[in-house]
Image: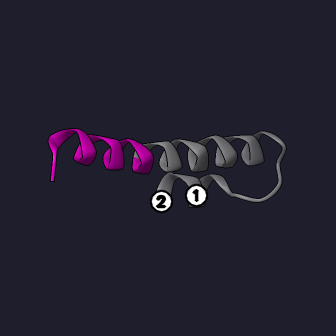
């Protein structure tokens, strides 16, 4: 596998993690969904 392909796949995983963190932070700001404890566990 080409090193660029590996980097692309890793980048997609990082993007998914960032989206989850952004969603979680927004939910905590709005006081719905994810609790602070649940967020810190992640």
Q: Name the residue under label 2.
A: 41
**SS at circle 1:** helix
Q: Residue 9 carries which label?
A: none
Q: Image height check: is 3 above or below 42? A: above
Q: Is the magenta stretch mostly helix, strand or loop?
A: helix
Q: Which residue is drawn at 66% across and 49% down?
A: 24
Question: What residue span does the magenta drawing correspond to?
Answer: 1-13
Most distant residue in the front direction: 2
Q: Which residue is drawn at 76% across and 48% down?
A: 27
Residue 13: % across, % down: 41, 51
Crowding at dot 2, Cα within 10 Å, few <14 / some 14-19 / many 20+, comes out as few
Q: Residue at x 43, y 47 (%)?
A: 12
Q: Image height check: is 16 above or below 29? A: below
Is 13 in front, or is 41? 13
Q: Residue at x 52, y 41 (%)?
A: 18
Q: Mark 1 points at which residue?
A: 37
Badges 1 and 2: C-beta atoms under 8 Å apart?
yes
Residue 35 vs residue 8: left or right? right
């Amino acid at each position: 596998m080409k090193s660029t392909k590996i980097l692309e796949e890793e980048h997609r995983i990082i993007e998914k993690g960032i989206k989850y963190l952004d969603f979680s932070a927004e939910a905590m700001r709005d006081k719905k969904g994810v609790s602070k404890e649940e967020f810190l566990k992640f």
